[in-house]
């Protein structure tokens, strides 16, 4: 039987500047789904990287008096540092300037060229350098700017190579009809289909106005269009042309996670290139919404760009990941604000979950000398708690499958709050006064601990640090690797007779006034 595999990608980001909270959002989502699939027993590949060619990078490097390679080398290090801080567990970081990638891009270009689907012609049009995209006059916005980013465009004329994208229009529409879940969220699907129905033009896939790129294999005067180059990274990442077995095992990708800004490249250009190269198409592309700051667009000129490194330094990696995944519904735009961040962390992590753990462990310490008691009988509240737990874990699983992270966490927190309510219902402090109620008290505390164990495993996809800290307090010695989603579904796996470890709160409360004063 072949192993269950799952291949997920993030965009490969442009190293023309440091990454911000928006990029962090995409990558956190990709890491979370990867960790979830691992818990379910899948063998996973998770690819990220940097998109290093193109005019935009060349211009940024020139501004800094550096060669493009020297310039990107420095910035790529900051990408990797950020992913390390965010505890992102990727399998490969693809740099488009690497030899492997270059040879894969040359190979795919040549393959499509040899087939007759790339031809030479002349190109004229309005070029948007930040988006690396040509536009026709009709496509420009009302002010004559780029319709995507609204910045100024330049008129350009060049001899270019063209990819016969128009040839694949009908096949692409058929594919989208046959695979209604390919484009996510569903509301974006029609947008893409309408765009295709307006008519796909052939795509200009080479440039001569700058030279920072991979040369066209049949013509050194041209470099390959940066999107043709970048999209191929999804093949490089799993060693296409180098490790056939691995490639066949993981391709087609299970999901490309991208922002809505680049959904078109992934659902129109990429599939048609793959069709021309006789490769299967990815199973799904999810174009999530954009993160705004205090309701507005993040921009350097406004000075409101949120630095994820500072946020992690100030609040910890779990808090940042929790906030991003809980606060913004995946697929719609959302807004970051520091007030809201602090409020969310204090109420959900410090109060609801932190208190549940503290109260429970402290009671085991107090009433059973820290030794996990046995669940010898049933209390009248157990069935209901267990029903909520079973139902919750099913909902968490279903929503994670759909990448609905915020709903999954909302459901999980219903259980956290329900478990807190179980303490109020069973009143362990009252039971503790009556020696005859010792068995009942033991049962209550065991149920609390066992629920916390299951909640901790369910948190593994979202939070890289808290679950292990929770297990330590719960007396569980197993390493992360021993946990699996099946253990979330099964109750009563916690061993009795082992000692819990009453420790510091794992989610300290944030004092907002103190934080703002320090800024
Ligand atoms: O487009 N909110 O790279 P890029 C949410 N190199 N997500 C955001 C965001 C925001 N405010 N800002 C950026 C490129 N993102 C190409 C990709 S892939 C083959 C090539 C995230 O550095 C989001 O995922 O401009 C978006 O799609 C991506 O960063 C754009 O990153």
Image (tube, rainbow, N blue to C red):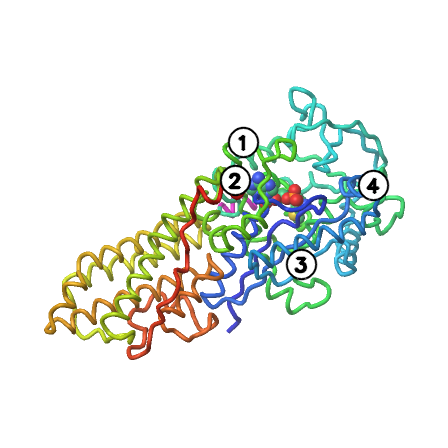
Residue 387, by quadrant, is bottom left
Specify the principal SS of the magenta part.
helix
Residue pointed to by mark 2: 289
Precedes in sequence: disc 3 or disc 4: 4
Q: Is residue 29 in view?
A: yes
Residue 391, by quadrant, is bottom left
Residue pointed to by mark 4: 62
Above/below status of 72 relative to 39: above
Q: Secondary structure at mark 2?
A: loop
Precedes in sequence: disc 2 or disc 4: 4
**CB at mark 4 closer than 8 A to ligand 1?**
no
Question: In the drawing, what numbered circle is on residue 296?
Answer: 1
Is 203 left, or right, of 344 in this rendering?
right
Residue 176 is a magenta residue: yes
Which residue lies most toward the top here?
142
**CB at mark 2 closer than 8 A to ligand 1?**
yes
Along the line of sight, the residue nearer the viewer: 208 or 492: 492
Whole-angstrom CA distance, mark 4 to mark 1, is: 31 Å
Along the line of sight, the residue nearer the viewer: 49 or 159: 49
Q: Position of residue 227 (x, y in %)?
A: 71, 44
Neighbours of disc 4 within 10 Å: few (<14), some (14-19), many (20+): few
Q: Which residue corresponds to the image point at 77% horizontal and 40% vertical from the top-left?
A: 60
Q: Position of residue 241 (x, y in %)?
A: 73, 64
């Amino acid at each position: 039987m072949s192993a269950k595999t799952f291949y997920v990608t993030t965009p490969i980001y442009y190293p023309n500047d440091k990454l911000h909270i928006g990029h962090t959002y995409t990558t956190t989502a990709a890491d979370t789904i990867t960790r979830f699939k691992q818990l379910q027993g899948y063998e996973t590949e998770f690819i990220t990287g940097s998109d290093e060619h193109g005019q935009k990078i060349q211009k940024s490097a020139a501004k800094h008096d550096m060669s493009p390679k020297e310039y990107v080398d420095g910035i790529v290090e900051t990408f990797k540092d950020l992913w390390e801080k965010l505890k992102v567990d990727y399998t490969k970081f693809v740099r488009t300037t690497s030899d492997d990638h270059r040879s894969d891009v040359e190979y795919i270009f040549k393959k499509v060229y040899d087939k007759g689907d790339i031809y030479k012609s002349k190109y004229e049009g309005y070029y948007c350098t930040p988006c690396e995209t040509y536009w026709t006059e009709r496509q420009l916005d009302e002010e004559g700017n780029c319709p995507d980013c609204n910045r100024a465009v330049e008129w350009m004329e060049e001899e270019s190579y063209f990819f016969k994208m128009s040839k694949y229009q009908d096949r692409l529409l058929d594919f989208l009809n046959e695979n209604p879940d390919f484009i996510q969220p569903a509301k974006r699907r029609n947008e893409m289909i309408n765009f295709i129905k307006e008519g796909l033009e052939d795509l200009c896939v080479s440039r001569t106005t700058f030279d920072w790129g991979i040369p066209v294999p049949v013509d050194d005067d041209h470099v390959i269009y940066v999107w043709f180059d970048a999209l191929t990274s999804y093949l490089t990442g799993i060693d296409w042309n180098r490790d056939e077995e691995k490639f066949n095992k993981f391709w087609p990708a299970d999901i490309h996670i991208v922002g809505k800004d680049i959904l078109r490249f992934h659902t129109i250009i990429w599939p048609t290139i793959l069709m021309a190269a006789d490769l299967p198409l990815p199973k799904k592309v999810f174009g999530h919404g954009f993160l705004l700051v205090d309701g507005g667009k993040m921009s350097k000129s406004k000075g409101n760009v949120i630095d994820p490194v500072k946020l992690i330094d100030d609040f910890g990696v779990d808090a940042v990941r929790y906030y991003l995944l809980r606060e913004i519904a995946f697929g719609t735009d959302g807004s970051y604000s520091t007030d809201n961040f602090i409020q969310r962390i204090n109420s959900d992590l410090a109060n609801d979950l932190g208190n549940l753990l503290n109260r429970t462990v402290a009671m085991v310490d107090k009433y059973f000398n820290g030794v996990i008691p046995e669940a010898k009988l049933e209390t009248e509240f157990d069935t209901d708690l267990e029903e909520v737990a079973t139902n919750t874990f099913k909902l968490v699983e279903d929503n994670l499958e759909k990448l609905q992270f915020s709903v999954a966490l909302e459901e999980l927190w219903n259980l956290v709050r329900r478990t807190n309510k179980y303490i109020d219902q069973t009143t362990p402090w009252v039971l503790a006064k009556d020696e005859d109620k010792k068995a009942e008290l033991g049962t209550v505390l065991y149920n609390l601990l066992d629920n916390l164990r299951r909640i901790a495993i369910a948190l593994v996809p979202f939070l890289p640090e808290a679950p292990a800290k929770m297990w330590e307090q719960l007396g569980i010695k197993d390493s992360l690797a021993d946990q699996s989603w099946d253990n979330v579904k099964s109750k009563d796996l916690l061993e009795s007779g082992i000692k819990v470890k009453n420790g510091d709160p794992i989610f300290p409360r944030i004092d907002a006034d103190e934080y703002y004063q320090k800024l």
